[in-house]
Image: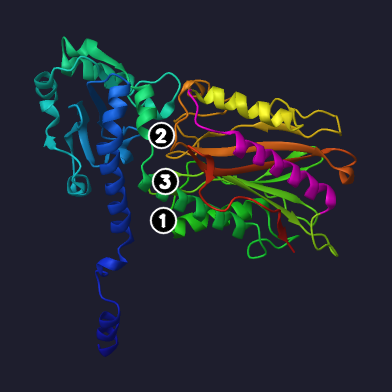
């Protein structure tokens, strides 16, 4: 009995407020949400000529923006409704509620789902944005059934005033507040720390550890720290003279291997995308061979050019064109993805600086060839991007075959250009 009482005295339950990590994270998200609704939402609605924005959800079918809008319990049909009121956007949650949503204090009105038609008619909007998108999955949360349901509930004339909110959602998500940038930078530091620990003797024993062992270790770190990822298995892969040889498989890591990690961490509602490179020393080596070190330095030179070139622009495409012009002027050779030339005298380059933030591949303006719609969006200060490149440089130690060096770290676009959010990849990590 005395032992049990002593344990109770030492370890009280519930834990004191200062130990409640869940509460701290919720409070941070509430602050971010309030600032987004106050500072970003009105301008995004004005810029996209929306009088109202309706986000439809139902139990078991949550919109991709559920976290951003405050989560909440959805038991049947539910709607988040935002109405342009000039300097301020009015916010209503209909058919959705719960402690965390309501206590956050960012909504003006809570009501039933059945009140939607009257609520909309009282405000008489001309253009109602809904989450239908041809190009951006994160802005395409309205299912076909939900669309038909919304039209039926609203009735004439409002059912004919629904328009795509694709560009609006991109503007709302990708226009960042200071508190968002701070949270994203924290996620970046966490992802860097875990990746660099993964490529060390803490995790890797040459001749014993497999690629998938490293990936599972990384996932265990996420689980232990209450983190997430917008990707699946971390890509822990081996590169050799013939290119990528294995990705997160049972292939055993051997001395002389050149390894890469491509992955990201989810912290709060922010998701990173980054890479790291490591070399497994052979017996007697103290550093990677000269050919690999030279290839890595060439990749860093490309990144330096990108950092100096990417600036705010009327469109992301214009910023991309200026960046490619600078890369080619610096003597690098532009190629299609994973199609290096046989010319040993040039370093071949592919770049894909893309939007990042609320997914590993974000929905804001993007300089990546695989985001054609987002190439047309304005590249504004405050945009979060992943500065991604692949450089292929001939390696004499591989009989002239080219070493594929990927570099990727996350940054924010400012009026001054690119600014890093955590220490970027400056060296090849070494495993002894």
Q: Mark 3 points at which residue?
A: 181
Residue nearest the observer in this picture, 293 or 16: 293
Mark 3 is surrounded, within 10 Å at the Cα level, by few (under 14), some (14 to 19) or many (20 or more) other residues, namely many
Q: How far apart are marks 3 and 2 (CA)?
A: 11 Å
What is the secondary structure assignment of the residue under circle 2? Answer: helix
Q: Which of marks 3 and 1 is in front?
A: 3
- Report x, y in % for residue 104: 21, 47
Q: Please tell me which residue is depicted at 45% across the width and 53% down the height of the picture.
A: 186
Q: Name the residue under label 1.
A: 226
Start-end of magenta stretch:
289-314
Dot 2 or dot 1: first in sequence order is: 2
Q: Please tell me which residue is depicted at 65% across the width and 41% down the height of the picture.
A: 304
- Report x, y in % for residue 346: 82, 33
> Image quarter for residue 253?
bottom right
Q: Name the residue under label 2.
A: 174
Specify the quadrant that holds the C terminus: bottom right
Q: Which residue reaches farthest front?
A: 416
What is the secondary structure assignment of the residue under circle 1? Answer: loop
Q: Is residue 152 magenta?
A: no
Specify the quadrant that holds the N terminus: bottom left
Q: Please tell me which residue is depicted at 44% across the width and 59% down the height of the picture.
A: 225
């Amino acid at each position: 009995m005395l032992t049990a009482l002593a344990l109770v005295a030492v370890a009280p339950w519930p834990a004191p407020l200062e130990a409640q990590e869940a509460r701290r994270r919720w409070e941070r998200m509430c602050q971010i949400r309030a600032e987004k609704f106050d500072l970003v939402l009105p301008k995004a609605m004005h810029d996209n000529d929306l009088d109202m924005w309706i986000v439809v959800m139902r139990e078991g079918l949550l919109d991709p923006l559920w976290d951003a809008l405050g989560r909440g319990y959805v038991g049947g049909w539910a709607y988040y409704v935002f109405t342009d009121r000039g300097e301020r956007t009015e916010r209503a949650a209909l058919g959705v509620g719960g402690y965390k949503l309501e206590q956050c204090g960012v909504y003006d009105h809570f009501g039933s789902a059945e009140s939607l038609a009257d609520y909309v008619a009282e405000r008489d909007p001309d253009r109602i944005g809904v989450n239908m998108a041809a190009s951006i999955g994160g802005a395409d949360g309205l299912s076909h059934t939900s669309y038909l349901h919304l039209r039926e509930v609203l009735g004439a004339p409002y059912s004919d005033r629904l328009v795509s909110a694709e560009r609006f959602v991109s503007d709302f998500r990708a226009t960042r507040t200071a508190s968002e940038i701070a949270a994203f930078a924290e996620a970046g530091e966490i992802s860097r720390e875990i990746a660099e620990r993964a490529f060390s003797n803490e995790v890797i024993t040459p001749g014993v550890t497999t690629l998938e062992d490293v990936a599972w270790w990384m996932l265990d770190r996420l689980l232990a720290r209450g983190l997430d990822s917008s990707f699946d298995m971390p890509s822990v892969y081996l590169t050799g003279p013939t290119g990528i040889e294995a990705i997160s498989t049972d292939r055993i890591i051997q001395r002389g291997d050149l390894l890469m990690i491509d992955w990201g961490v989810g912290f709060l509602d922010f998701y990173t995308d980054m890479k790291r490179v490591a070399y497994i020393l052979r017996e007697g080596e103290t550093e990677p061979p000269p050919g690999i070190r030279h290839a890595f330095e060439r990749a860093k030179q490309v990144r330096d050019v990108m950092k100096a070139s990417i600036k705010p622009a009327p469109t992301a495409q214009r910023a991309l064109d200026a960046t490619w012009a600078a890369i080619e002027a610096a003597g690098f050779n532009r190629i299609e993805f994973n199609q290096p030339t046989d010319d040993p005298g040039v370093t071949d380059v592919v770049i894909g600086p893309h939007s990042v933030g609320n997914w590993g591949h974000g929905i804001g303006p993007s300089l990546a060839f695989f985001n054609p719609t987002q190439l047309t969006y304005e590249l504004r200060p405050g945009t979060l991007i992943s500065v991604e490149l692949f450089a292929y440089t001939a390696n004499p130690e591989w009989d002239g075959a080219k070493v594929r060096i990927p570099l990727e770290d996350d940054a924010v676009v400012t009026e001054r250009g690119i600014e890093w959010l955590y220490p970027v990849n400056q060296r090849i990590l070494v495993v002894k």
